[in-house]
Image: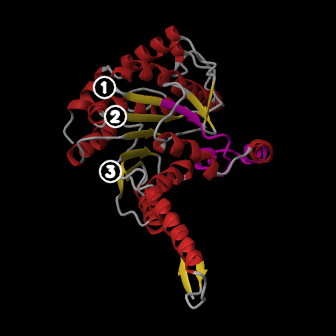
Amino acid sequence: MTKYHGFFIDSNVKAHPLIRNEYAAFFVLISTITLEKKAKMKDKIVIITGANKGIGKEAAKQIAKLGAKVYMACRSLDSSNQAREEIVNETKNQNVFVRHLDLASVRSIINFAEQFKKEESKLDILINNAGLWTKTKKLTDINVEQTFAVNVLGHQLLTQILLHELKNAAPSRIINTASHFAGGLDIDDINFYKRNYNETLAYKQTKQANRMLTREWARRLEKDNISVYSMTPGFIPDTELFREQNVVGKFLLKVFALIEGRTIEEGADTIVWLASAEKIIESNGGFYNQRKEEKCKFNNLDDEKRLWDKCEEMLNTAEVKNKLFEKV
């Protein structure tokens, strides 16, 4: 009895030659499809931020299965190295690497990008996935509210620094993890100086910003043959994003999960599809849910341009310039 691609075949069975030939052809076809699937992203280089847990980890695993070279850009090296070991063991893809990246730190973003540029000359896919939801207001080293710094501004800076490598790989893609849970953005009060700080609103405004900046990036990079998409993973209760919720908050999340919840695998699926599909027939700059484009309610060219300019203003401060010229 021989096992072949999950099927057991009795090699001693005497069958008509045509039948045996048909079996052989079938198993060769299955083998070919399997190999082609594993090689679908061969020679592709991918960066995924926040790839040590949740949908980022799952996306990294599925993309590694497709044969890509994956850089896991994460703040916690311990959990990242553990995640990498699991991914390599399951996918048998050794081209999975962990690199430190703290999106709340300009210096860390620059260090990560500089190291990547020394290792690679191109970047096929940048997946801006890392996210933060924090209960308390905190400003970063360049005086930006931490949730906005991690979820929006850090990815904005990272993308800008890696544009040369993305252009070298064209046609290339940028994928931004956004959400349906979005809104309340005040471009003139991102840091909550005028408004009372609210953790939910702080998170929601970053997801609105992700969707708006995706559209602005798409317009600016279309001539360079770089496509930009945003997506929602849906509501995933089994994620580190809600780790700071109190008992009541966690209970309400569990109730909501029964109605609208998705698994981590389901949440990561659209990321993997956007990264690996040979062609996305829907519009560049689109917002995607379960592999389908949805109309983005935050569709205002003037506001998108104003938000872009606000981010540029934040990244043009003396603090940022000092970080750019600091010695590592």
| Residue on which the image places disc 2 | 106
Type of residue at label 1? Answer: Glu
Amino acid at pointer 3: Asp
Do the CB atoms of the residues marked 2 and 3 lie less than 8 Å apart? Answer: no
SS class, disc 2: helix
- Compared to 138, does 84 lie above or below? below
**Residue 5 in view of the camera:** no
Q: Position of residue 112 (x, y in %)?
A: 30, 43
Give the residue type at disc 2. Val
- The x and y percentages for residue 191 are 51, 22
Q: Identify which residue, 15 or 290, lies in the foreground.
A: 15
Give above or below for 40 relative to 113: below
Report how far apart the C-alphas of labels 2 and 1 lie in the structure: 9 Å
Q: Quadrant of residue 206?
A: top right
The magenta span reads 229-252
Which is in the foreground here, disc 2 or disc 3?
A: 3
User: Label 1 crowding class (10 Å Cα cut-off): few <14, some 14-19, many 20+?
Assistant: some
**Which of disc 1 and disc 2 is earlier in sequence?**
2
Q: Earlier in the sequence, mark 3 or mark 1?
A: 3
Seen in the image, is 267 located left or right of residue 169? right
- Which residue is painted at 61% across and 41% down in the image? 233
The residue where tag 3 is placed is 43
Q: What residue sits 60% from the left and 89% below the top? A: 13
Residue 141 placement (x, y as % from top left) = 38, 32
Q: Does residue 237 show up magenta in the picture?
A: yes
Residue 131, how many percent across, how many down? 52, 40
Residue 11 lies within the magenta run: no
Q: Label 1, on which residue?
A: 319
Please name which of the two marks, 2 or 1, marks the residue nearer to the observer.
2
